[in-house]
Amino acid sequence: MTEEIKNIEKSEKYKGYKRFLTVVLVIAAMLSSFGFGIYITVKSDAVKQLAIKEVVYAGEVLGKYQKNEDGAYTQDIDFNLFWKTWDALKKQYVDQEKITDKKLFYGALRGMVAAIEDPYTVFMDPKVSEDFSDDLAGTFEGIGAEIGIKGDVLTIIAPLPGMPAELAGIKAGDKILAIDTVITQGMAVDEAVTKIRGPKDTKVTLTIVRDGLSEAKEIEITRGAIVVSSVRTEKKDDGIFIIKIISFNNDTELAFNNAVRSALDSGVKGIILDLRNNPGGYLDTAIEVASEWVDEGPIVYEQYGDDSKIDHLARGRARLKDFLTVVLVNEGSASASEIVAGALQDKGLAKLVGKKTFGKGSVQSLTNLEDGSSIKITIAKWLTPNGRSINDEGVAVDHEVELTLEDYNAGKDPQMEKALWLLSSKEAWSAAPSVLESASSTEDEELAD
């Protein structure tokens, strides 16, 4: 037994803590399995099996070791440093009443996962994990806005229509500098969500910067009960049917199927699929939606670190494939909404109008842990059917149309107006430029050179 092991075992006070925390740290580090694209995996059996092997894993981590046969460890790790840090905080920190073992424990797990430096790979303690589940269920209390990290800055991906954030004047693309005077620099998304959320009728102040504003602005928002109905429809007098998808949540598949039936029963001439400010959701739901246009072949590719791919194929219904379709997107369209938009564009089944999408093209797998916490891990990246990467790049539009603050305040929607114009004029539709055609022609020239 090494000297380091002996030193650890001298402290009986922390012996139980060390074994338990060490095992959980290792288990959390080893577990892996979108979409933001998210799909849920349950690893309870794997967790149980790892727990059975407690002694093996504890021995490997507690001691100094060289690279093992599987190549899992690349350098020596002295785990005494962890406990020395733990002890120093417990003994020396000035506000001892603020320190609890649970806070240190979850903080350690959160920090370990944050070391990956991927804003979408996060550890969520039981409270944050519960909030995340509520998001996907479409019911919670807060301001009603999806947030993410863009350019290392906490950013509003999408305010939900009719919810407190939008009513207070929050826009997609707003950068959050502070939450109730707490600076957000370096703040993880889950921590920001926890600070922004709260009981209805309470208030939170966001300090934001926005393109077009000369200085930072404080916006006070009164929290409310957020109940998200993810699909809305509207039929225009000229036979254009508008389907607005707020997010790809638990209720989306059934609600979208009802919307498609309604569109077909009403004898529509064209479809507008509005995915603006849609932050994403379940991968399976995105595939179901895209499959109402795409009759065969891949909807999206899932590319892993070793360049292997999984193709997610159309489900074969394609009830809307013969209708002229415009997809509305903007900077707040992310993840699952980018999958749908990219697939329809690649297949030549729709024109995209608005602004380039957010660029959240990575795949997260959610693993629920035994204490109610969970870990969301980026396991792959999305590629469109033509092999275009969505991550960081976003999906470019065929027709770029601004929606300015002045338009918004005046009740105008030039992006919707452009979509309606395209669908009402066959000549305009046939003459409409295609991002894909332009990209293909450029690529051919480069290859020819």
Image: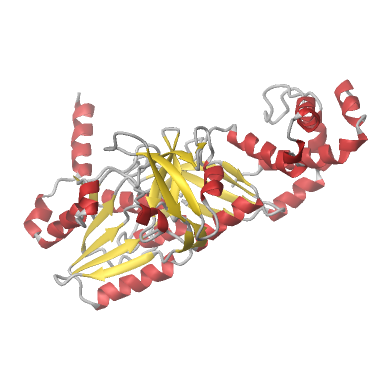
Relative to 264, residue 297 above or below:
above
Quadrant that contains the N terminus:
top right
Q: Residue at x 36, y 49 (%)?
A: 170
Give how far across and how far down residue 87 sits, in percent.
80, 30
Residue 351 seen from this side? no
- Dividing the picture into quadrants, the one containing residue 161 is bottom left
Give how far across and how far down residue 291 sits, in percent.
35, 61
Give how far across and how far down residue 321 sits, in percent.
26, 63
In depth, the one of 207 and 132 nearer the eye is 207
Q: Residue at x 65, y 48 (%)?
A: 125
Relative to 187, residue 249 above or below:
below
Give how far across and how far down residue 20 sits, in percent.
80, 42
- Dividing the picture into quadrants, the one containing residue 239 is bottom left
In depth, the one of 446 and 368 nearer the eye is 368
Q: Residue furthest left?
A: 427
Q: Residue at x 91, y 26 (%)?
A: 6
Relative to 394, residue 320 above or below:
below
Q: Residue furthest bottom?
A: 265
In depth, the one of 389 and 155 nearer the eye is 155
Quadrant that contains the C terminus:
top left
Q: Would residue 341 appear left or right of 362 to someone viewing this image?
A: left
Q: Residue at x 50, y 43 (%)?
A: 180
Q: Would residue 257 appear left or right of 189 to someone viewing this image?
A: left
